[in-house]
């Protein structure tokens, strides 16, 4: 039961007195709703965020002129010792995968606002021919890693309160895509209130505070508070493969990456792709004042952006593709106390309800933490360069770059390349020069594997995913 007087005292003390008036102005049933939602908010945290909103900036996590260094990179071209190490690492990774020491972590709590879809982005039908959804693509890769059910492939999926029910229902409706239902663990991420430039909590409706997901960095504490970490321990998992929902080319069960990470006894590792050119606006993995992290494009001077190494490649080329490996011990260590990742503050126009109950657009601030900031906490880390065309083509925007169109194009191009390299006949190219072939992720994960498994015919079936892609 809500103690209204106590709640109002808390609100006044926290500089949120405007909400007292809102509470008083509501009829009892709605007042109860608002009171319950306000009670769930951590006001100590809100005070900290309010300071950020008032100054309108991200806290000084970096010095004014940070010392920036590229990471030690395991390069794409592996020669000599690097090639031998990679072979040993791949063997090691295969062992980890085959003995069920690896768990899979997907972040799918985002709002997908750029794509402009209602509902979970994972439902988006990305398969150019199959129409398979992003969730189905990922699930089939995990099914493949399960080696016909011989290895359990626990999958921890972070949703948000806004898409949790719909995500679970989608998995139910599709028989968990052939995975063991008990091995799929959903949990919603935490939400944070959005604040106005004076640090006051905004309302989305008269009886509802404006809440937004706390960023993919919320994964780490979420894995502990949801009980996922306990589940990982109970299953004897040692490493986690982290990926994002929007990349249909991701390889969650890559033995090389997992093997390199495990052999280095790394806490958290990253896969990167070479930037297309100095001007590509992506964050790069690198050292910031000695600590590993993601250097934002805007933080690199023109000179550093163009700087070359002794092989003539960009020094800062390690484009972050948000694919990581984490050891379960690392996750346990960093979330044991009060994990403090830096806040990233986004200023946005938000649809809110004003003092008079009218729908208006106001400037507000959203607060997120990012998973890559945990790299700074990892003593050892591997940064592995991979081929962009093989592993990265995210669906971010409704059109143009990183859109459904580019993801479908990249899938077709990659898979046609596998068929051609394996000596298969390709169907005629369409008007865009694309051959309409798609390889089921359950059949092969790489071109080499595809070639080995030929001539069996890969078949993609539409499993009846009823989702209207835009
Ligand atoms: P993005 O940064 O692309 O954000 O998320 P988004 O919310 O999906 O899309 P926009 O910016 O609104 O268009 C990268 C990955 O991190 C997850 C997303 O689901 C996606 O897999 N994510 C992001 C979360 O799980 N929680 C968050 O709070 C933010």
Image (spheres, rainbow, N blue to C red):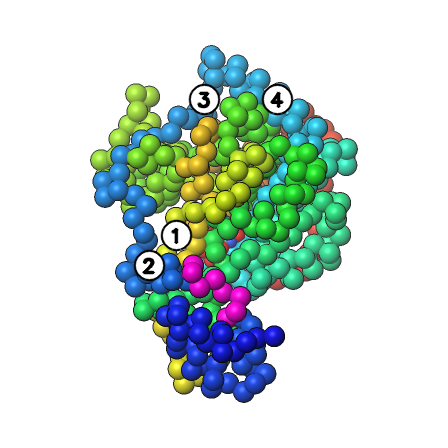
Report how far apart the C-alphas of labels 2 and 4 lie in the structure: 45 Å
Q: Nearer the viewer, mark 2 or mark 4?
A: 2
Residue at (47% x, 84% y) in the render = 24
Q: How many marks?
A: 4
Q: Nearer the viewer, mark 3 or mark 1?
A: 1
Mark 2 lies on a secondary structure that is helix
Mark 4 sits on what residue?
Answer: 92
Which mark is on residue 52?
Answer: 2
Marked residue nearer the N-terminal end (3 or 1) = 3
Residue at (59% x, 22% y) in the render = 90
Report how far apart the C-alphas of labels 4 and 3 lie in the structure: 20 Å
Report how far apart the C-alphas of labels 1 and 2 lie in the structure: 9 Å
Report how far apart the C-alphas of labels 3 and 1 lie in the structure: 36 Å
| Residue 292 visible in the shown view | yes
Tell whether 374 sits left or right of 291. right
Tell whether 297 sits left or right of 453. left
Does 325 sit above or below residue 432?
A: above
Q: Is residue 42 magenta?
A: yes
Q: Position of residue 67 (x, y in %)?
A: 27, 34
Mark 1 sits on what residue?
Answer: 343
The residue nearer to you, when weighing 441 against 290, is 290
Mark 3 sits on what residue?
Answer: 77
CA neighbours of label 2 inside 10 A, class few (<14), some (14 to 19), many (20+): many
Q: Find residue 309 and report its image quarter.
A: top left
Tell whether 370 sits left or right of 230. left
The residue nearer to you, when weighing 71 against 203, is 203
Mark 1 lies on a secondary structure that is loop
């Amino acid at each position: 039961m809500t103690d209204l007087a106590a709640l109002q005292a808390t609100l006044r003390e926290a500089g949120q007195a405007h909400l007292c008036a809102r509470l008083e102005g509501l009829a009892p049933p709605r007042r109860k709703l608002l009171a319950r939602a306000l009670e769930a908010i951590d006001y100590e945290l809100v005070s900290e965020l309010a300071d950020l909103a008032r100054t309108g900036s991200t806290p000084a996590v970096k010095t004014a002129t940070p010392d920036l260094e590229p990471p030690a990179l395991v390069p794409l071209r592996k020669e000599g010792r690097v090639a031998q190490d990679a072979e040993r690492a791949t063997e090691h990774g295969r062992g980890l995968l085959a003995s069920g020491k690896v768990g899979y972590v997907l972040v799918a709590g985002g709002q997908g606002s750029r794509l402009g879809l209602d509902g979970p982005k994972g439902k988006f039908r990305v398969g150019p021919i199959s129409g398979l959804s992003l969730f189905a693509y990922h699930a089939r890769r995990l099914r493949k890693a399960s080696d016909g059910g011989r290895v359990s492939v626990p999958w921890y999926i972070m949703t948000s309160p806004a898409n949790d029910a719909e995500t679970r229902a989608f998995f139910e409706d599709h028989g968990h895509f052939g995975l063991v239902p008990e091995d799929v663990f959903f949990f919603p991420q935490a939400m944070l209130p959005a604040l106005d430039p004076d640090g006051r909590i905004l309302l989305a409706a008269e009886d509802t505070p404006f809440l937004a997901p706390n960023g993919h960095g919320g994964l780490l504490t979420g894995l502990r508070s949801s009980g996922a970490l306990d589940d990982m321990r109970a299953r004897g998992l040692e490493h986690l493969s982290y990926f994002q929902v929007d990349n249909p080319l991701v390889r969650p069960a890559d033995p090389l990456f997992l093997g390199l990470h495990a052999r280095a006894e790394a806490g958290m590792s990253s896969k990167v792709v070479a930037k297309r050119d100095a001007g590509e606006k992506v964050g790069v993995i690198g050292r910031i004042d000695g600590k590993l992290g993601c250097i934002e494009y805007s933080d690199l001077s023109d000179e550093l952006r163009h700087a070359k190494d002794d092989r003539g490649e960009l020094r800062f080329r390690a484009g972050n593709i948000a694919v990581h490996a984490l050891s379960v011990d690392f996750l346990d260590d960093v979330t044991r106390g009060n994990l403090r990742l830096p806040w990233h503050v986004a200023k946005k126009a938000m649809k809110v309800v004003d003092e008079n109950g009218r729908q208006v657009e106001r400037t507000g601030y959203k607060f997120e933490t990012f998973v890559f900031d945990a790299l700074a906490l990892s003593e050892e880390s591997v940064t592995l360069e991979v081929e962009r065309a093989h592993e990265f083509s995210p669906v971010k925007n409704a059109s143009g770059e990183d859109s459904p169109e580019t993801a479908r194009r990249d899938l077709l191009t990659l898979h046609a390349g596998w068929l051609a390299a394996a000596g298969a006949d390709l169907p005629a190219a369409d008007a865009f020069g694309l051959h309409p072939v798609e390889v089921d992720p359950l059949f092969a994960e790489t071109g080499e594997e595809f070639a080995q498994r030929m001539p069996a015919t890969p078949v993609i079936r539409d499993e009846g995913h009823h989702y209207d892609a835009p």
